Image: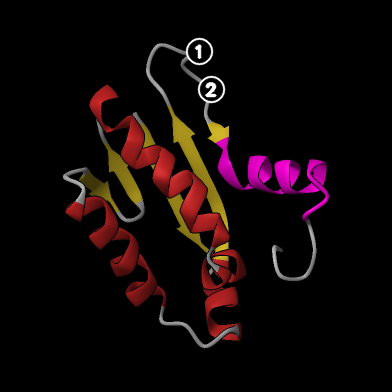
Amino acid sequence: MMMEIYFDEEKCKEHNYDINERYQIIDKFFEDNHVKKIDKGVYLGTKDDFTVFNKANISLPRTKWFRQIIDKMYWRVEGLAPAYREDCMEAYYDSMRKCGLLNEDTM
């Protein structure tokens, strides 16, 4: 299982965030949960790390600074089609829309 998180450099500048500090926050989350970082914004786990990846998938998009600067967030799970990877932000916005919760505070 793998998660890819890519921040938009221009959005970081626009919102006065240091992009490297933001990646360090994400790195610490995965490191604290014993998930290996294999590249900038890319984390590799096993099926035993499902809960960690699910927590990241649910909690990160709910964080305002994260939504302000995210470019792409993908979650890949082994055993599915090789090219399949879930676009986490698309799924977040879709579920918020379906629940009637999509507004300025959740965008």
Vertical order, 25 against 47 (above or below): below
Vertical order, 39 against 8 (above or below): above
What label does residue 46 carry, if any? none
- Badge 1 element: loop
Q: Quadrant of the N terminus?
A: top left
Vertical order, 34 against 25 (above or below): above
Please report contact status of discs 2 and 1: CB closer than 8 Å, yes or no: yes
Crowd band around label 2 with a 10 angstrom C-alpha radius: few (<14), some (14–19), many (20+): few
Q: Nearer the viewer, residue 54 or 9?
A: 54
Q: Nearer the viewer, residue 27 or 32?
A: 32
State the residue position of label 1: 81
Q: Nearer the viewer, residue 15 or 91?
A: 91
The residue located at (46%, 35%) in the rendering is 75
Residue lying farthest to the bottom in this orientation: 16
Crowd band around label 1 with a 10 angstrom C-alpha radius: few (<14), some (14–19), many (20+): few
Q: Quadrant of the C terminus?
A: bottom right
Q: Position of residue 40 (x, y in %)?
A: 32, 56
Alpha carbon separation for disc pair 2 and 1: 5 Å
Q: How is the image coloured?
A: secondary structure
- The residue range painted magenta reads 87-101
Q: Position of residue 45 (x, y in %)?
A: 25, 33
Where, by quadrant of the figure, is residue 71 drawn? bottom right
State the residue position of label 2: 84
The residue located at (80%, 64%) in the rendering is 103
**Image side of residue 40 versus residue 11, left or right:** left
The secondary structure that dominates the magenta segment is helix
The residue located at (44%, 52%) in the rendering is 5
Q: Amino acid at mark 2?
A: Tyr
Q: Does the segment drawn in magenta span residue 104?
A: no
- Badge 2 element: loop
Q: Position of residue 15 (x, y in %)?
A: 58, 84
Q: Amino acid at mark 1?
A: Ala
